[in-house]
Image (tube, grey):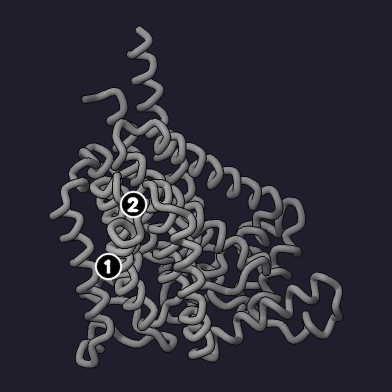
């Protein structure tokens, strides 16, 4: 009887996680519609254009969530399959950089990050991040006894992960590359790697990171903007705030104007040309403005619940691979959400990272739902042989 009760609890944890994800998706489609309808009309489309596209990706992602959840996550413990998935994503990243592929990988806002295959638009870096997490979990499982050593454990991981991250940097997309390395680093650390190795790597890679920031004027601008906003918050003069980025300033204005209950669904002003990327990179600001403090807190509760369940699934997984994979996916979702929210509140430099399940963007949505499916699969396999 006790075993049956535990089994039911395991199943419902997975279902609750999926319910939280679906709730975020539904709220995200509503937020995208509210934040994008005017821009869609100005672009010659119907007001629901972007929301409908998000819904289409949500249907695809939902189907993949169900399929993955019903499968056995240990399918990816196979070395050949994990390598194949990662290699396929690397090919996609390379295609973005080739000079003769501009017809399917056009430059948008100074970056080549999307592959356009007919009606589909795919962002390979999102899939590469998930593939890297799966691959790292697989390798950490196989190298269980050697991860404590730099040469035999950590270095072989870096030989693969650093070039993958470098391809993402060249798009350019420094934030996504740093996120990939950070999440995979957490997986390796939980798998047994020493913290001293990561401190050494961080020390060695800091000049490279600094050079990457200084190489692009817009990255320097984002960093200076954050410093100016921080100085203003600390009370070192209003001129610092006045000189800060228009985008960050408008984000703060939007969230502040929402007060307790928000200005009302669809009634926000910041999306009227004041806040760029109001339905993608800064959608949490739109939520704060229209849904108020209450709406923002609800979103934070949902993400906290997702992360809490994810870590519990990792802690109770039946095998090492499931534990590492669940940890990596949970950290990926939680870290991305935290950074997005921090940016909108001027607590971190602008990164361009989406709000998982919520921001407009098909690749991120599909990858987040696939990751949720893997977590559900890990939860469902507890108590089974």
Q: Which label sits in the foreground, 1 or 2?
A: 2
Residue 96, visible in the rendered structure: yes
The residue that mark 1 highlights is 160
Q: Which residue is mark 2?
A: 147
Whole-number angstrom distance, CA of label 1 to CA of label 2: 15 Å
Q: Residue furthest top?
A: 1
Percent from the top left, x then y, of residue 174?
45, 76
Q: Residue at x 50, y 52 (%)?
A: 334
Between 6 and 44, the one lying in front of the other is 6
What is the tally of numbered marks visible in this picture? 2
Residue 136: give x, y in percent of width and height: 30, 55
**Which circle's residue, 1 or 2, is located before the other in the chain?**
2
What residue is rendered at 42% in x and 45% in y? 22
Q: Position of residue 9 (x, y in %)?
A: 40, 22
Quarter of the picture containing the N terminus is top left
- Please identify the quarter of the rendering in which residue 5 is found: top left
Question: Is residue 152 rendered to the left or right of residue 209?
Answer: left
Q: Position of residue 364 (x, y in %)?
A: 38, 62
Q: Which quarter of the figure is the C terminus placed in?
A: top left
């Amino acid at each position: 009887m006790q075993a049956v009760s535990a089994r039911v609890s395991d199943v419902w944890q997975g279902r609750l996680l999926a319910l939280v994800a679906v709730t975020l998706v539904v709220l995200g489609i509503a937020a995208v519609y509210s934040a994008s309808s005017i821009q869609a009309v100005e672009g010659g489309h119907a007001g629901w254009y972007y929301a409908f596209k998000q819904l289409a990706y949500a249907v695809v992602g939902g189907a993949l969530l169900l399929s993955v959840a019903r499968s056995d996550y240990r399918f990816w413990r196979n070395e050949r399959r994990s390598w194949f998935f990662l290699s396929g994503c690397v090919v996609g990243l390379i295609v973005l950089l080739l000079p003769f592929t501009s017809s399917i990988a056009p430059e948008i806002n100074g970056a080549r990050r999307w592959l356009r295959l007919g009606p589909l638009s795919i962002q390979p870096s999102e899939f590469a991040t998930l593939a890297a997490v799966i691959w790292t979990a697989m390798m950490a499982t196989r190298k269980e006894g050697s991860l404590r050593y730099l040469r035999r454990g950590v270095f072989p991981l870096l030989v693969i992960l650093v070039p993958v991250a470098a391809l993402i940097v060249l798009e350019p997309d420094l934030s996504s590359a740093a996120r990939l390395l950070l999440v995979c680093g957490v997986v390796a650390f939980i798998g047994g790697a020493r913290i001293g190795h990561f401190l050494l790597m961080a020390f060695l890679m800091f000049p490279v990171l600094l050079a990457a920031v200084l190489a692009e004027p817009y990255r320097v601008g984002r960093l200076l903007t954050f410093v100016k906003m921080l100085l203003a918050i600390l009370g070192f003069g209003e001129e610092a705030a006045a000189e800060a980025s228009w985008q960050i300033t408008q984000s703060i204005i939007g969230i502040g104007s929402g007060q307790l209950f928000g200005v009302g669904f669809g009634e926000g002003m910041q999306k009227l040309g004041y806040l760029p990327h109001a339905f993608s990179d800064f959608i949490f600001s739109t939520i704060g403005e229209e849904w108020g403090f209450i709406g923002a807190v609800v979103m934070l509760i949902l993400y906290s619940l997702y992360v809490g369940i994810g870590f519990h699934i990792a802690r109770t997984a039946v095998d090492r691979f499931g534990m590492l994979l669940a940890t990596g996916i949970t950290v990926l979702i939680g870290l991305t959400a935290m950074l997005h929210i921090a940016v909108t509140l001027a607590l971190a430099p602008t990164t361009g990272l989406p709000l998982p399940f919520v921001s407009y963007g098909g690749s991120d949505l599909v990858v987040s739902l696939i990751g949720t499916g893997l977590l559900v699969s890990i939860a469902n396999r507890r108590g089974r042989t």
